[in-house]
Structures are given as structure tokens and as C-alpha cells.
Amino acid sequence: MTRKLFAMFVAVIVIIVELPLTAFAEAAGFRGIKWGTKLSTLKNMQLLEETREGQKVYSRKDDQLKIGGADLESIDYHFWQDKFYGVMVTCKGYQNFRFLKDSTFEKFGAGSQTNPFMEDYMWDGKTTGIVLKYNVISQKGSLFMFSREILVWCV
């Protein structure tokens, strides 16, 4: 899982550096948790992973694994120096991805599609970045939302 996290962070850094800012309705966090919120102020958080780089990944025990019509596999909350900086949402199957995509587009507008033949979208705002992807081989969808300010420091 550490390799997966590292690859994800490298991809996000490339997005931050390469893409121009796109206007969209930015999120200040996820499900009521604002970017930069200290872990100690949150309840029902369960540690899933801790990396050598000091990053920690948690789940919320009371999280509803649903966004729009999508049934989710997981919602993982990412922290660096005990500050909330990102969330990874995953789902299985194209139907669930379509529901997740529809909800994401409804909330943030249409993202930039890097390849018209792939379900791969990005939103790059001043405070928040978003990556939405579907992998045809694994049949898994993912939504990664992150604080641009904090992510730059933890990578």
C-alpha cells in the first residue's frame, strides 16, 4: 500500500505543477472536515496505515459508504503531522463509478479529461485538487481530493 500511496502522491504533484488553475466550486474539505483540521479534534477515527514519511491514513467508524447512488468500498482520510489534507474514496464496478462521477460533476462541474478514451478527470483549484479515475482492468473507481497547500509540504 505504501507504493500505491507514493505513486498517487507523485501523480498529484505532477497535476499541481502541470495543469493551469481551473475554475470550479472548490471544497474546503470533505464531509464536514476542513483541510488542516487536527486529528485530535475528530471522533471515531481508526488508524489504517502509517508511512515512514509521517503520513497516516484513517477511516471513520461511522462513515456512510455512499455518495449519490454509488456504493463505496472505502473512504480513507489522509493526515500529515496530524493535519487533514486529503481523502481517497474507492468503489468497485463501472455502475458505482458512474454514480460517483455524476455526483462529482454535479458538485464541482465537469473536470478536465486528460484522455478522451479514458475515464480520468482532474480539477485544479487554488486550495483544492481533485482526481477522479476508473481503471477498466481492476474495475475500480477512485476519487482523491486534497489540500494543495498541505500536500506540497508532505510529499
Image: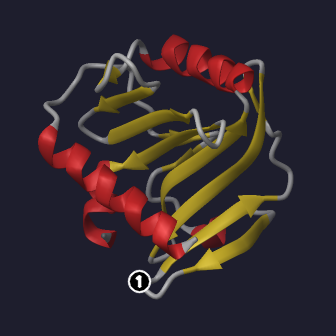
For the C terminus, the quadrant is bottom left
Colour setup of the view: secondary structure
Residue 1 rendering spot, x and y as whole percentages: 58, 71
Residue at left offset 50%, top offset 64%: 4
Q: Is mark 1 on a helix, strand or loop?
A: loop
Q: 93 or 11, which lies in front?
A: 93
Q: 83 or 114, which lies in front?
A: 114
Residue 136 rendering spot, x and y as whole percentages: 58, 33
From this view, report whether residue 23 is shown above or below residue 72. Answer: above
Residue furthest to the bottom: 52
Asked if residue 136 lies left or right of residue 154, the reply is right
Asked if residue 139 lies left or right of residue 84, the reply is right
Residue at left offset 46%, top offset 88%: 52
From this view, report whether residue 60 is shown above or below residue 138. Answer: below
Which residue corresponds to mark 1?
Answer: 53
Query: The residue under label 1 is which amino acid type?
Result: Glu
Q: How many marks?
A: 1
Residue at left offset 65%, top offset 26%: 97
Residue 61 rendering spot, x and y as whole percentages: 84, 58
Residue at left offset 71%, top offset 74%: 47
Q: 49 or 107, which lies in front?
A: 49
Kindly indicate the quadrant of the structure image that contains residue 95.
top right
